[in-house]
Amino acid sequence: MANIQSLRGMNDILGDDSELFTYFVENASRIAKNYGFTYIETPILEETALFKRSVGESSDIVNKEMYQFIDKGENDVCLRPEGTAGVVRSFVQNKFDRAGGTYRWYYYGPMFRYERPQKGRLREFHQFGCEVFGVSSVYEDANIIMMIKDILDFFQIGFKLQLNSLGCPTCMPVYRDKLVKYLTNIKEELCEDCNRRIETNPIRVLDCKIENCQKLLYNAPKITNNLCEKCDTDFEKLKEILDFNNIEYEIDTNLVRGLDYYSQTAFEFTSSEIGAQSAIAGGGRYDRLVEFLGGRATPGIGFAIGIERLLELVKIKEEKKDVIYLGALNEEALNTLTQIATKKRDNTKTFMEYTPRGFGKHFKLAEKCRATIVALVGENELNDGTIYTKNIKTQEEKTIKLEDF
């Protein structure tokens, strides 16, 4: 009988990847908490309508990539392809939109898109994200960007920041008409997807990755030249704040993000260290999304980081904390070691080997555990109330009283 394999594009996280994954989540979460965010967890399975109304029916995610099915209760459901929509649904469902105030949440977990698997792009992938509700100030846009910078800086990941403004309901329709007029004149030379988007969501044409389309779009009208006074003022203020904080950025007028709900600020962090799939984090403002999902108009902004894309770039900073390996030289020592392990685990990472072994085998196992201190108890130690220790870093060996250990 053939062994059952994991599904294509859905990988186990274990070994070194597991260590890097938890290290990333723990430290990104710590930084988010320092910025005033609290944790939220939303269901992996949601109504399909949630993503059609938020992500947009014209998007590739909804059109091509969702894991969608009818469940046993005849509900049209899908595995979440991104995190923001579920958090907004929770915000509205729990009536936070009516309560007013400011809400800052962070989350992490699996997302699902039926794409062609490749390096850095899986069908089940994980994101770390943050969402803010109730703050319309452009200072919050800068705050979010600075937090992502802090996260990437902590992990020593080099990046480039690209910025754009997607306008608002005042200036976007005017720009949209200009863009459609331009695209209509060149539509015969554009790809099939671009032609479809001219009818459904022409702004997404700017996001086309096909080289020929990009050349044809070089002279297309730029949204940044068509912003209303408020959007233009906000965008200039955002650049001023980033300049003041010495955060480098590039203006990319074709940056529209892959989701339909963004307005005004849009941004993307890229890295040249991970090949073609260079986007490592992105997000923007979505001031109308709460309203689209049935809530009261509430400003919102957020971002997501693709965790798998970063793992090969994450370097674990060496901690000075000790890791203890406890081993028994005979069966009688196990009870004593169990007692020691319980006390040590209050504040120190501690491994305990349950099988009595000789010195050499214990040290080999300690090496696999990456222990810094090996502590062994045998017959002599039990009789004397002592424990043998060796510091792997300094090579210092000594036998000390149990209470001192």
Image (tube, helix red, strand yellow):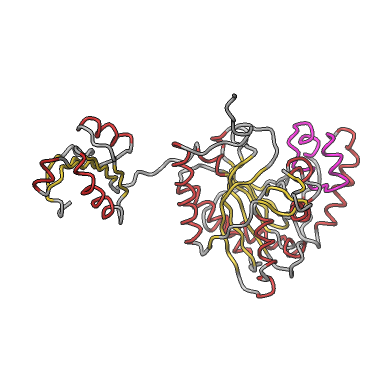
Residue 242's place in the image compared with 317, above or below, is below
Task: Please give the range of residues in magenta.
Answer: 191-218
Residue 324 placement (x, y as % from top left): 27, 45
Let me know if residue 214 is in the magenta part.
yes
Residue 351's place in the image compared with 361, above or below, is below
- Quadrant in which the N terminus is drawn: top right
Residue 306 placement (x, y as % from top left): 58, 44
Looking at the image, which residue sits at the far top?
1
Task: Indicate left or right for 376 with 160 as reference.
Answer: left
Let me know if residue 390 is in the magenta part.
no
Picture quadrant of residue 2: top right
* Residue for point 58% across, 59% down: 142
Residue 198 placement (x, y as % from top left): 86, 44
The total number of labels drawn is 0
Q: Main secondary structure of the magenta part?
A: helix
Task: Indicate left or right for 139 with 21 as reference.
Answer: right
* Along the line of sight, the residue nearer the viewer: 56 or 387: 387
Residue 224 can be seen, yes or no? no
Looking at the image, which residue sits at the far bottom?
99
Picture quadrant of residue 68: top right
* Along the line of sight, the residue nearer the viewer: 75 or 226: 75
* Residue for point 85% across, 47% down: 200
* Along the line of sight, the residue nearer the viewer: 404 or 322: 404
Task: Indicate left or right for 190 with 14 as reference.
Answer: right
Looking at the image, which residue sits at the far left?
384
Residue 400 can be seen, yes or no? yes
Residue 43 placement (x, y as % from top left): 63, 55
* Along the line of sight, the residue nearer the viewer: 252 or 404: 404
